[in-house]
């Protein structure tokens, strides 16, 4: 947020600069130095542009053609114009480019640069625009004078300048006039020579004397046009006078419009006697019925007369005052005044509005605008000053339709009194929370709502208004319903989690208990088989073999159930390490499977792409997955090959185990990873098909603990590819590169 003081100081200084009619160079230097110093910019440049120069830079062309300032608050190597990218490369982060013009012709650009981002906000831009305008005006008046000086020297040579000019004796007798002057008064040279300038302009003796002393004067022609007259003294009795029609003010107004000058301040001029002679068109935004100021003396409008009188003694000044325009009293405006060409120039800014603006334009604004709550800002008397988008939607009013109206009108019937009371309480206590009120939308609909009113005070503790935050009841109910649902879901989740924890624990315990008797069965059977209790006959041997095989299967099943229980309890901790996947192929379990495959007449291959980085994983758990996938592949493949491919895919390492086996139907593919799922056996001998249906669900748990994904592509009769991914730890990768 910008200091009010810096802005006022800047505008003052700029106005002051012109009073001294410095050389353009000096004027420019002081102007740019001021901007740099007052607002803390790193570089301020004025670039001259010759009106008809060819090959303008793109940014110059933009500024000249649009007559609008160009702002880039985040210069980057993608900025719109190549020049801007150069600035970015030199360390600048924001830029504003203002077109400068004189006599309606572009003469240059003002470039303001900062090494910080987001340097230009609306308020600063408005202030700079005003300054730039005043500066341009001074430059152009100046340039007229410059030209005139030359013309005075070579007077006969040309009268090119568009400004009406005359050579005139100090007593007012016209010696010569240029073409513009003749056009202006529709006269011929012969008509004009020898006439007194007083016949053309309403100039009195004093003015003429001032002019002949080189002092500027504002003069009117008899047809009511107003001109700024300035002069160069050529000799004791002869001067050269230029008359610049005062259309600049019109231009100023045009500009103020184009640039959407804030509602916070307007410009005005006083004549030497203190009479208001001009106000900028946006004055109405700050002071209602501002036109009433025109023609009146400032002192008559201001309530604090002594204070103003005192101020007038030491212009320039800037002070808070109260204006009384008869019909309306406008308090809390700041009047800033400086000596102008022919009287005074000043700015009146609305301090109150400025403070609202500050409240609104702080970061809060973002939040206020985006919340689903409706937010109204009202002043201390209860008049609407602002509202957010939700309020616009709910109430059906556009901001401009409702601002400045009495906010209590928004309340329906009895609610109106309640609202007024609530404001009263908020004023005393600071806040009134969650009171119920019906508001009425533009189309007459009654909107029930809950509202909270907080008072706004400025730094000095003075009340400046209220913020009303409301929740439409329908929305409030919806939110409450959602909150209830969420709470319910949470409770269920807890319950389920509790239940499933119990189940897991139960399974774990039972499985664990089963292990001991089975180990015993296995042990004794194997002793039986070895003949420790006497030789067995062939039939007995066959039965013992089955007992052994089945108890082995049972053991495996229990081991897997234990695994599933542990993994799905989420209590398992991975033993994370850097794992080199090409080395993993050397692991004994995998080597053993390779042998099983080759013995079955299958070709086995293990391929790891050269660019596969090490992954962070639990190597034993990964091997468990590999073993499951590879042994499944072997189990379900009669001819052909089993190939393992490991390669990098984006931010993951992808592993594929492909076989040329029986394949899996689409329907079964979807169910495979469920616990205990086995594809209904078709023509497989029991032995081959023997399994638990847990392997893939364990693999899935393990892979998801690694934050990877697992899946299958398969076609019945052609084979299957089981794949999984392990994300590459990018942080780790960086370290490795360094
Ligand atoms: P199991 O212990 O029964 O192998 P898995 O979870 O590892 O349990 O596999 C589940 C089922 O998926 C298997 O019974 C089998 O029907 C099917 N399956 C797994 N891998 C393959 C494969 N490579 N080719 C064909 N079917 C497969």
Image: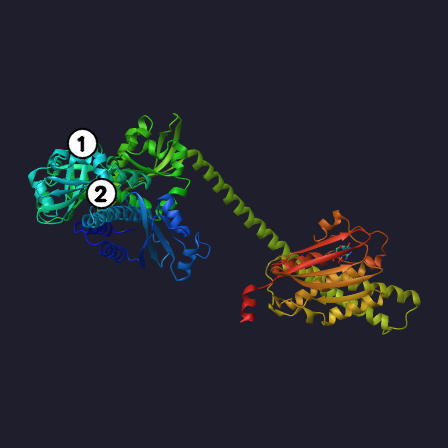
Res. 301 in view: yes
Of the residues under marks 2 and 1, which one precedes in the sequence? 1
Q: Quadrant of residue 75?
A: bottom left
Depth check: give the residue in front, 566 or 235: 235
Picture residue at 27% right of the left edge, 34% below the top: 383
Picture residue at 36% right of the left edge, 30% below the top: 438
Task: Find out if the beta carbon at label 1 lies less than 8 Å from the nearest ligand 1 atom.
Answer: no
Quadrant of the rendered image holding ligand 1 = bottom right
Side of 504 where 557 appears, left or right: right
Query: What secondary structure is found at the residue carrying circle 1?
Result: loop
Side of 268 where 493 appears, left or right: right
**Mark 1, residues whose alpha carbon is within 10 Å: few (<14), some, or many (≥20)?**
few
- 2 and 1 marks in contact (CB < 8 Å): no
Picture coordinates of residue 616 (x, y %)?
A: 60, 66
Depth check: give the residue in front, 161 or 294: 161
Separation of marks 2 and 1 at Cα, in angstroms? 31 Å
**Mark 2, residues whose alpha carbon is within 10 Å: few (<14), some, or many (≥20)?**
many
Picture coordinates of residue 514 (x, y %)?
A: 72, 62
Side of 563 where 143 appears, left or right: left
Depth check: give the residue in front, 198 or 120: 198
Q: Which mark is residue 136?
A: none
Picture coordinates of residue 178 (x, y %)?
A: 21, 40
Side of 479 where 637 appears, left or right: right
Circle 1 residue? 224
Q: Quadrant of residue 348?
A: top left
Picture coordinates of residue 462 (x, y %)?
A: 21, 44
Query: What secondary structure is found at the residue carrying circle 2?
Result: strand
Task: Find out if the beta carbon at label 2 lies less than 8 Å from the nearest ligand 1 atom.
Answer: no
Please tell me whether residue 343 is drawn above or below residue 59 in the rendered image.
Answer: above
Res. 330 in view: no
Circle 2 residue? 349
Outermost residue, bottom direction? 532
């Amino acid at each position: 947020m910008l200091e009010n003081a810096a802005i006022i100081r800047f505008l003052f200084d700029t106005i002051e600069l012109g009073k001294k009619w410095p050389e353009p160079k000096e004027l420019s230097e002081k102007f740019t130095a001021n901007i740099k110093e007052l607002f803390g910019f790193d570089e301020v440049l004025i670039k001259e542009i010759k009106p008809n120069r060819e090959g303008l830079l793109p940014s110059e062309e933009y500024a000249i053609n649009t007559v609008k300032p160009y702002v880039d608050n985040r210069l980057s190597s993608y900025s719109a114009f190549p020049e801007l990218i150069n600035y970015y490369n030199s360390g600048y982060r924001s830029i504003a480019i203002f077109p400068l013009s004189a006599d309606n012709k572009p003469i240059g650009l003002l470039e303001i640069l900062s090494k910080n981002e987001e340097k230009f906000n609306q308020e600063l831009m408005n202030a700079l625009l005003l300054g730039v305008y005043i500066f341009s005006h001074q430059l152009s008046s100046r340039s007229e004078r410059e030209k005139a000086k030359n013309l005075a020297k070579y007077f006969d040579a040309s009268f090119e300048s568009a400004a009406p000019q005359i050579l005139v004796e100090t007593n007012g007798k016209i010696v010569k006039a240029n073409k513009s002057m003749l056009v202006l008064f529709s006269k011929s040279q012969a008509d004009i020579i020898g006439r007194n300038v007083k016949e053309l302009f309403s100039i009195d003796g004093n003015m003429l004397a001032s002019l002949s002393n080189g002092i500027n004067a504002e003069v009117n022609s008899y047809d009511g046009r107003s001109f700024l007259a300035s002069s160069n003294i050529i000799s004791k009795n002869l001067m050269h006078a230029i008359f610049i029609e005062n259309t600049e003010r019109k231009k100023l107004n045009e500009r103020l419009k184009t640039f959407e000058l804030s509602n916070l301040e307007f410009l005005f001029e006083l004549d030497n006697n203190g009479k208001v002679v001009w106000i900028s068109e946006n004055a109405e935004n700050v002071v209602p019925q501002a036109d009433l100021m025109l023609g009146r003396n400032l002192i008559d409008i201001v309530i604090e007369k002594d204070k103003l009188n005192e101020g007038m003694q030491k212009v320039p000044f800037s002070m808070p005052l109260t204006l009384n325009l008869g019909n309306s009293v406008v308090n809390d405006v700041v009047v800033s005044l400086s000596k102008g060409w022919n009287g005074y120039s000043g700015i009146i800014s609305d301090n109150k509005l400025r403070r609202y603006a500050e409240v609104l334009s702080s970061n809060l604004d973002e939040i206020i605008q985006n919340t689903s709550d409706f937010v109204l800002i009202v002043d201390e008397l209860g008049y609407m000053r602002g509202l957010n988008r939700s309020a616009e939607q709910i109430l059906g009013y556009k901001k401009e339709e409702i601002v400045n109206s009495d906010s209590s009108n928004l309340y329906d019937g009895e609610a109106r009194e309640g609202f007024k009371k609530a404001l009263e309480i908020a004023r005393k206590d600071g806040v009134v929370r969650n009171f119920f009120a019906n508001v009425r939308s533009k189309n007459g609909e009654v909107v029930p709502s809950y509202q909270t009113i907080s008072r706004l005070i400025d730094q000095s503790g003075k009340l400046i208004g209220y913020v009303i935050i409301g929740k439409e009841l329908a929305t409030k109910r919806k939110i409450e319903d959602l909150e209830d649902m969420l709470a319910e879901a949470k409770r269920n989740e807890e319950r389920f989690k509790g239940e499933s924890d119990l189940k897991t624990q139960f399974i774990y315990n039972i499985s664990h208990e089963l292990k001991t008797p089975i180990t015993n069965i296995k042990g004794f059977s194997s002793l039986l088989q070895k003949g420790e209790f006497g030789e067995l006959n062939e039939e007995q041997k066959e039965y013992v073999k089955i007992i052994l095989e089945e108890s082995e299967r049972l053991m495996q099943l229990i081991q897997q159930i234990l695994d599933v229980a542990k993994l799905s309890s989420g209590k398992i901790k991975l033993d994370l390490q850097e794992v080199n996947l090409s080395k993993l192929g050397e692991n004994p379990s995998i080597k053993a499977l390779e042998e099983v495959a080759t013995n079955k007449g299958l070709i086995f291959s293990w391929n790891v792409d050269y660019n596969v980085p090490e992954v962070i994983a639990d190597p034993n758990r990964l091997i468990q997955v590999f073993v499951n996938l590879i042994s499944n592949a072997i189990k379900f493949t009669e001819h052909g090959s089993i190939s393992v491919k490991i390669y990098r895919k984006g931010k993951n390492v992808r592993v594929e185990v492909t076989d040329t086996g029986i394949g899996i139907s689409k329907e079964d593919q979807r169910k495979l990873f469920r616990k205990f799922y086995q594809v209904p056996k078709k023509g497989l001998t029991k032995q081959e098909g023997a399994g638990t249906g847990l392997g893939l669900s364990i693999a899935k748990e393990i892979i998801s603990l690694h934050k990877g994904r697992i899946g299958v592509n398969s076609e019945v009769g052609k084979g299957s590819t089981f794949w999984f991914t392990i994300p590459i730890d990018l942080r780790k990768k960086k370290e490795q590169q360094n």
